Amino acid sequence: MSEVIQYDDIHLNQGEIAGRLRLASSGLGWKESNSEEPYIVSASDIRKAQWSRAARGFELKLTLRNGGFVQLDGFEDDDLDTLRKTIKKYFDVILEQREHSLKGWNWGKTEFSGSELLFNVSNKPAFEIPLSSISNTNLSGKNEVSLEFSLFGNESDMGKLENQVVKDATIQDQLVEMRFYIPGMTTTGSEENSESVNSASVFYETLKDKADIGQVSGESIVSFSDVLFLTPRYDVDMYSLFLRLRGKTYDYKIYYSSFVKLFLLPKPDDMHVVFVMGLDPPLRQGQTEYPFLVIQFMREEEMEVELNLEDSEFQEKYSEKLKKKYDQLAYEVVSQIFYGLTSRKIITPSTFRSYRDHAAVKCSMKASEGNLFCLDRSFLFIPKPSIWIPMSEISHVTLSRINTSLSASRTFDLTFSLKGGVYYQFSNINREEQKLLEDFIKSKNIKIKNDLNDDSQAILTALDDELSDDDHSIPISDDGESPDDDFEAESDSDVAEEYDENVESSKDSGEEDGPKSKKMKSK
């Protein structure tokens, strides 16, 4: 029986909880102090081993044959010799020493090494990125490439990262995006057929190929290329576990588990129907987040599609959720397919009806005009910015008017104050909607603070002021002549100029016309 080498206080995959590591000829095992099931790696699965400096002393990084990684840190410098001999003896792998660049520069060279993307500074790696952790990449402009990383909280992404053994459930802060600025041009092709292309484009295409981004197994179940996205705009390809959004600049792969809300709502214009999809985590374009996707349909538009599924597969997986062929209104087709693939309930309008018998009221959110839908358990403002307000988070609602002028008396503002201190104000709501909104909010047992009654006297005062201004008129003479007709200007000869000899000096004028000075006597 082979000897077992043991190390204490070792952290697995940069986790916060330390455990015990054991090495034997059959492989390695790591176990937390409070856990009964150890994490085991077979000796035949280990392809490469590296030793480097880490946050907790030194780190042993094992590269597996399936492309995954195992990171073990917390070693002392004195453990290097023992580990090198043990790994060579038990796993037949040479332990390599890797020195990282500590200059802190943010410029260097990228290199694809196996299943990793290296960022080298002065020929030393500053950091490594596992390609399996990259969920999406986009070419932003001519010289910038953005990388988006898988979120450990997403069940679908966790399945993708199984080979990385990310088991630490205490992860809270995660890196979600990184951007590379890649200037210049590069030459591709043979010497005879060489071509000068953008370096950022070459890096982007290489990354997509290495990380298997944009490549999907099998064909899509259904595609929608003529739907109108309001925030933002894309074509849609739907697969069994995810959908792909294809735009001019950005492409996204979104798992159905990220869809948390679905709404199907008629717009107050009696012409359109909107299908709203809530995402968690939200869609990101640079610094902009889109927690909702909004698709708009013409109310009478029809659509005919057939699912790209074999009859046997359809009967086995989708017969209870979907239909093999659709030929009906477009918004019904898209919403029903989303419902079948995401298994999310579609929320429709409540019993609320506006003054003009619509499911929403027109209003403004700052400078953006939109519609506020009063639903059974929430309020939803669309299209941009899309804001969802659950009734359970509302502290109180305030009806007010910022401007007390006569023209503003036809509208009012509605402010939702949430329990966490956040508030949303919707303005320019027609005064005719006031009682209907008040009755609906009261029926949901939400506190209402009405400041409109306090403003009534101010509006009446403003009205009186405007009416009183109309009583003042300019007097007009009876003879119809202008008041300026009696004015006679002096001729040029009557005005003494400075160079005229008739002009009296200010000194002489002051002596003749001015008051005489008096002497003051002190008593």
Image: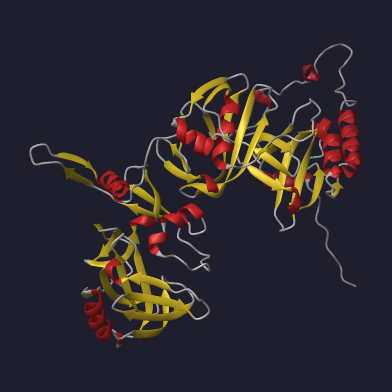
Q: Which residue shows up at 77% across the image and 20% down it?
A: 484
Q: Most extreme residue toward the top, as rendered?
A: 479
Image: 85 above or below 182:
below
Q: Quadrant of the C terminus?
A: bottom right
Q: Position of residue 340 (x, y in %)?
A: 57, 37
Q: Which residue is nearer to you in this view: 84 or 436?
A: 84
Image: 445 above or below 295:
below
Image: 174 above or below 328:
below
Q: Position of residue 125 (x, y in %)?
A: 27, 67
Can you see residue 232?
A: no
Q: Most extreme residue toward the left, as rendered?
A: 192
Q: Position of residue 205 (x, y in %)?
A: 29, 44
Image: 50 above or below 479:
below
Q: Which residue is nearer to you in this view: 501 or 343?
A: 343
Can you see residue 178?
A: yes
Residue 327 placement: quadrant: top right
